[in-house]
Image: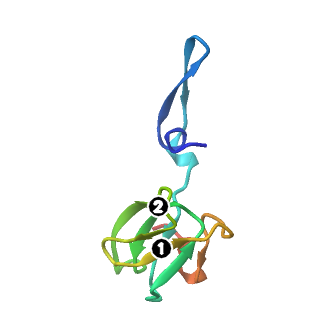
Amino acid sequence: MTRKQAVGTLWCAASSKRTFRSKIMTEHVVPHFNNDPGVAVIEIGAHEFMCVGAKPPFDHPHVFLDMGGDKEIICPYCSTLYRHNPSLDPHAARPEACALTEAA
């Protein structure tokens, strides 16, 4: 599934006619991660995610980050280095405490 299919509407050209398809954003939950432990690097299974900094109420503005084709990205607010690990589930992190599973 492409990002356009996951977050919006997509016009698909099927032979000579156009077909309208839509995907509801709530069907795609964006993983949230935190750096409450204060580690230098967090390995995650997602390429697109939210960084919240520390756990609420000490969180920074929730920042949507997209690695694209890269393997790493740095949060512009807290300077946490996130590194993609394809062996992890998209909602999992290493260390495990950095995966925010409760409502952010």
Q: Residue at x 37, y 66 (%)?
A: 62
Residue 82, label in figure: 1
Q: Residue at x 55, y 37 (%)?
A: 23
**Is residue 96 left or right of 35 when viewed as pictured?**
right
Q: Nearer the viewer, residue 76 or 31?
A: 76
Q: Can you tell which quarter of the image residue 53 is in?
A: bottom left
Residue 36 % position (x, y): 45, 85
Q: Residue at x 51, y 79 (%)?
A: 42
The relative height of residue 66 versus residue 21 in the rendered view (above or below) is: below
Q: Quadrant of the C terminus?
A: bottom left
Residue 83 % position (x, y): 52, 73
The relative height of residue 18 versus residue 23 in the rendered view (above or below) is: above
Q: Secondary structure at mark 2?
A: loop
Amino acid type at mark 1 = Tyr
Q: Quadrant of the N terminus?
A: top right
Q: For the residues labelled 2 and 1, say whether their Cβ atoms are less than 8 Å apart.
A: yes
Q: Neighbour class for label 1 at 10 Å: few (<14), some, many (≥20)?
A: many
Amino acid type at mark 2 = Met
Q: Nearer the viewer, residue 63 or 16?
A: 16
Coloration of the structure image: rainbow
The relative height of residue 21 versus residue 46 in the rendered view (above or below) is: above
Residue, disc 2:
67
The relative height of residue 34 versus residue 20 in the rendered view (above or below) is: below
Q: Can you tell which quarter of the image residue 96 is in?
A: bottom right
Q: Can you tell which quarter of the image residue 94 is in?
A: bottom right
Q: Secondary structure at mark 1?
A: strand
Residue 29, label in figure: none
Going from N to C along the chain, the mark reached first, 2 or 1, is 2
Q: Neighbour class for label 2 at 10 Å: few (<14), some, many (≥20)?
A: some
Residue 35 % position (x, y): 45, 81
Single out the residue that lies furthest toward the front: 70
